[in-house]
Image (cartoon, rainbow, N blue to C red):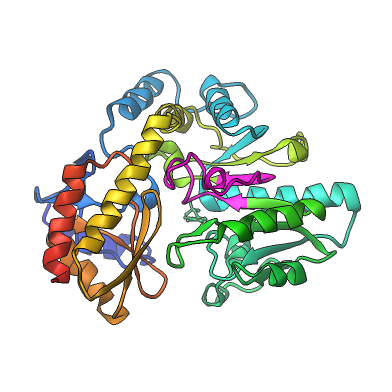
Amino acid sequence: MSFQEIKDREATYVMQTYGRFPVCFDHGEGAVLVDVDGKEYVDLTSGIGVNCLGYHNPKVTAAVTEQANKLMHVSNLYYTEPMIDAAEKLVKATGMSRVFFGNSGAEANEGMIKIARKYSHDKYGEGRSKIVTLVNSFHGRTITTLKATGQEHFHHDFFPFTEGFDYAEANDLEDLKKKAGKDTCGVMMELIQGESGVRPLDADYVKAACEFCRENDILFMVDEVQTGIGRSGALFSFQKFGVKPDVVSMAKGLGGGLPIGAVMVGEKCADVLGKGDHGSTFGGSPMSCAAACAVLDEVTKPEFLEEVEKKGEYLKESILAIGSPEITDVRGMGLMLGIVLKNPENRLKIVGELLNQGVMVLTAGEDVIRLLPPLVITREEMDRAVAVMKKVFGS
Ligand SMILES: *Cc1c(COP(=O)(O)O)cnc(C)c1O
């Protein structure tokens, strides 16, 4: 089928919620994708942080194939081992206590919000249900997680939104203390804000915010949907920031390409959700959890995480070495990087030209090109991408 036919059928049958680039992908290997016409692309997006072990990873493929040959789904009314294995791996790698599996980042954050509200309600009763998030955060696309997102331009069209959210300026402890008062049960933040521009929070602020929450019995909740699963150079970014959250959400990279999300709690909240309090039909699917086990076995290896760190440094330095006046900064952690542009009005043109020449990137915020390459990307693949950037950015 020609690309034009594919495009026409999509426009006819699929809701037009995405501005898609004019490429249809067929398969991939490592960090390289191939479109239906056989053209190759170095992927610096990982399907927005999902394909952390790249395409056609032998371990993930084998785990999923083996599981598909045994059992794809039974309900959560029964036990399945891959879910328990995945939960055990997460708990043992973090010192947290328990895990609940769902299917996406937004669903994981919904779980996190429910935990905060129930923890507080069980202990203090009514009037303590507010959740404070940060300005420029992104937490998902459900009615509640849109409202949790600290960006006004997401709060339209779908009224009424869920009540009980407020937003504090990032890196401003006084503002957090002011917003998170006696009516507050939880504070939720991304430690590196992703969607709004790849902005790592100040480590001192994160520590102080965590401490403030602990002192006031407000749950400190970290959205690791994008930063988790090795992306920052640690399994979770909170480990890099040296804090111990009460609740952590994750999704994107966890299934290595299969849909899965999870919310993980520390000791304080281990028993907040009991029988009947929460559920998800597909949550903990043996397929997704088998993939997650394969991913976690790789991503929890210290040498793997060290490589992520080194590769992130290498990519950052290589991009800075282009010396383009268009690039004012490259910021981020591990393999979560943002190229800050001097002239953001050129961004779409640059992204389109990179794609034309076989390099896929993302955008974030107003003026950033966001890079979330597969964590297994090789130096050769990075060199190939940077050579194209050099041409597109000039020097
Ligand atoms: C992507 C993302 C989400 C939403 O995840 P979905 O799987 O699309 O629901 C939530 N929080 C953060 C930080 C994200 O990057």
How far across and down, in percent of the image, does residue 203 sit?
57, 56
Is 206 colored magenta in this rendering? no
Residue at 55% across, 30% down: 93
Magenta stretch: helix, strand or loop mostly? loop
Front in this rendered view, residue 140 or 392? 392
How far across and down, in percent of the image, does residue 56 sit?
25, 34
Residue at 69% across, 53% down: 210
Q: Is residue 307 visible?
A: yes
Magenta stretch: give its range.
222-249
Front in this rendered view, residue 191 or 78? 191
Is 228 colored magenta in this rendering? yes
Front in this rendered view, residue 57 or 206? 206
Left or right: residue 250 versus residue 306 is right
Q: How many marks?
A: 0
Residue at 55% across, 33% down: 284
Q: Is residue 358 visible?
A: no
Left or right: residue 270 versus residue 347 is right
Q: Is residue 386 above or below residue 230?
A: below
Left or right: residue 348 versus residue 52 is left
